[in-house]
Image (cartoon, rainbow, N blue to C red):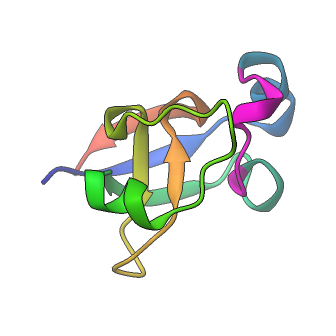
Amino acid sequence: MKTYTAKLKTRKQMEKDIPRAQWGWWIDVCPGATLQLRDATEEDLARCILEEGSSRNHEDYLCESKPERGWLILRDAVAEIKVN
């Protein structure tokens, strides 16, 4: 599984680029932050709550590396990404 260092978009960019129905915790908690992420899995999607209208495809998400069972982040929320 790949891991990444990713810088999220600013809140203003996310509001412009991502439909409101797809917003997650990351739009309020860490816009513009640099995070350690990994590829999301089907198991991650199964344990996380997704709003109606959100993608159900695990490839559309990344997941926090820490904690081990981290939360999902929509790939569209990422401004810059580097494979570790």
Which residue does the image show at 51% across and 63% down from the upper left? 48
Number of marks present in the image shown: 0
Residue found 41% across the figure and 32% down from its top: 60
Residue reaching furthest to the top: 17
Q: Residue furthest bottom?
A: 67
Compared to 16, does 59 lie above or below?
below
Between 6 and 65, the one nearer to me in the picture = 65
Quarter of the image where one finds residue 47: bottom left
As for residue 35 lying within the magenta part, the answer is no
Look at the image and say whether residue 19 sits in the magenta stretch: yes
Residue 49 locus on image (x, y percent) = 59, 59
Q: Residue sitting at 51 percent across and 65 percent down?
A: 71
In the rendered image, which quarter is residue 3 located in? bottom left
Name the foreground residue: 79 vs 77: 77
On the question of residue 60 being in view, the answer is: yes
Residue 29 in the image: state x and y as whole percent: 77, 62
Q: Residue at x 55, y 54 (%)?
A: 34
What x and y, as percent, mark residue 59? 32, 34
Residue 41, visible in the rendered structure: no
- Is 44 positioned to the left or the right of 3 in the image? right
Q: Quadrant of the N terminus?
A: bottom left
Q: Is residue 49 left or right of residue 5?
A: right
Q: Position of residue 80 (x, y in %)?
A: 48, 32
Judged left or right of residue 58, residue 54 is right
Q: Quadrant of residue 28?
A: bottom right
- Which residue ends up furthest to the left in the rendered image? 1
Q: What's drawn in magenta, residue-wise?
A: 18-26
